[in-house]
Amino acid sequence: MSSLQSLFQDTFVRRRTVVIIAALVLTSLVLFADTVFPAGWSTALLGAGALLVMATLFQLFRPGRPGRPGNPDTAEDPESPGQKTGADNSRPGAGLLLYLSPVILLNLVYPLVSPEMAAANVGGVQLTYLVLASSITVPWLAQAACLPAYRLIGDLMAERNMPAITRRFCANWPAMFGYALPLVVLFGIPLWLAARWSFTAMATYAGLCALHLLFVQSLVLANVGNRRGLWALAWVAYAAALFAVPTLWWLPPLLGAATQIAAMGRGLASISLRNRPAGRNFALDVVRGLLLGAVLWADKYLLFLATDGDFPVVIVFVSMLPAVIAYNYYFVHLAPRVDKAVTSLHRSIAEEPLTVLAAESKRLTRTVDRAILSTGAVGMILTLAVCVVLESLQPADVLLAVCVGTASWAFMVLTLLSYELDYIGVRMLPQLLGGIHLALCAAVFGLVSATANPTAAALAYVALVAADVLLVAIAWVLYKRHWSQPEYTLFWRHATSW
């Protein structure tokens, strides 16, 4: 009950909650647009959806200043951390735009090169299918393969000592890459069992995944250092190679990784084949990454297995874009505020009296609540807008669009809640939630593979929406339990680490 009451104690939180519920209801009503509006209204619906998309993106990308009346994230609270961090938030739109460069560039390039890729054949399989298979594998694979790197440099990240971080990363990178390669086999075996591709095709898929594994690990330093320009440069190089020579499947990840390796500079002198991360810690982090990453990415991989890649790719990927944009919005624009509030609380634990500590604790809880609900509101509004647009352009696929879009939103919120639990030191509960989600995905897409019903995929996502909304409610209760008094959770985590 206290978890529900917390939604109504803050005007900002109440408004975001109402926005989420209203957008969710309106998204479900998009399914009935054809019966409510006459045929001539499709153009009006397209315009309304496009206008809503542009208005929402304008709010995300606009170059506002923290603490000014026009900033909706800080105007209602004079003590909001957003007003204390002008350096971080003075150009939120530019940072988010650079961070979303892979989404923007790849969605521009792939439609242009798809015909040439479809004409290429590797081992009896169209190159398009091989690239699609690796594309839906790599995000999940990356979460598992990169998490050990963050543990390795974790004690250096607070001071942002990039030379020291680079040296340690480079010293252990060969071993981390080698240790992560078995993950390619782990993902490849189910694909081979489902698709029965030739050895040449499977070898190409494995090569694609391995090269992308190298690429995503090379991006760790740009991410840790908040070097958005360097991050975007990698994806510009990737997209340029893809556009120039679409059939050279190995070139884009190699060229993208080369931009990051060149930026490591003198740190490359620390590369060693002798250093080995602790095997047990590496394995634990890989499992943790697989379970946490499963919430956001497992459904696409399992959908590919269930349908042999024969599903409306454009509809599925466009429908999940709102969740991807909202997820990136959180980490670029809102997560720094949470980090600063946590740092302030740590300082209060060490230096301030209990009265100040209580105020800092309340401020931190409010900051995290607002960040999660703001992200949820952004994601749901964009989902509504995209579904309205697709209803006007592809009415036959609107059921799938609504189901995938709503499910992706639920996956994103569950991922954020799991991340916050993991962030505060509660490790097992997020992994349990991820494991339950993965089991549910495997079950529903197993049923999809057993039927040729064209609406089976949409119905699978309906089942996942119902299940994950329940998981989101459970995760919210757990999140509030551990974040209602974060000073105690953070203190005991620190105390028991000695």
Image (cartoon, rainbow, N blue to C red):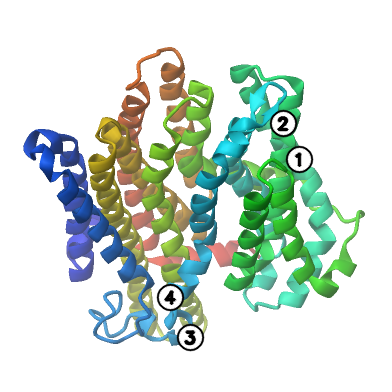
* Disc 4: which residue: 92
Disc 4 secondary structure class:
helix
Q: Are marks 2 and 1 in contact (CB under 8 Å)?
A: yes
* Disc 1: which residue: 181
Q: Nearer the viewer, mark 4 or mark 3?
A: 4
Residue type at mark 1 is Leu
For marks 3 and 1, the one nearer the N-term is 3
For marks 4 and 1, the one nearer the N-term is 4
Disc 3 secondary structure class:
helix
Query: Residue 308 vs residue 257: left or right?
Result: left
For marks 2 and 4, the one nearer the N-term is 4
Residue 20, given in percent of the width and then of the height, sits at 23, 54
**Is 418 in front, or is 246?**
246
Quadrant of the rendering where the C terminus is positioned: bottom right
Residue 286, given in percent of the width and then of the height, sits at 66, 44
For residue 198, which quarter of the picture? Answer: top right
- Label 4: few (<14), some (14–19) or many (≥20) C-alpha neighbours in 10 Å: many
Q: Nearer the viewer, mark 2 or mark 4?
A: 4
Disc 2 secondary structure class:
helix
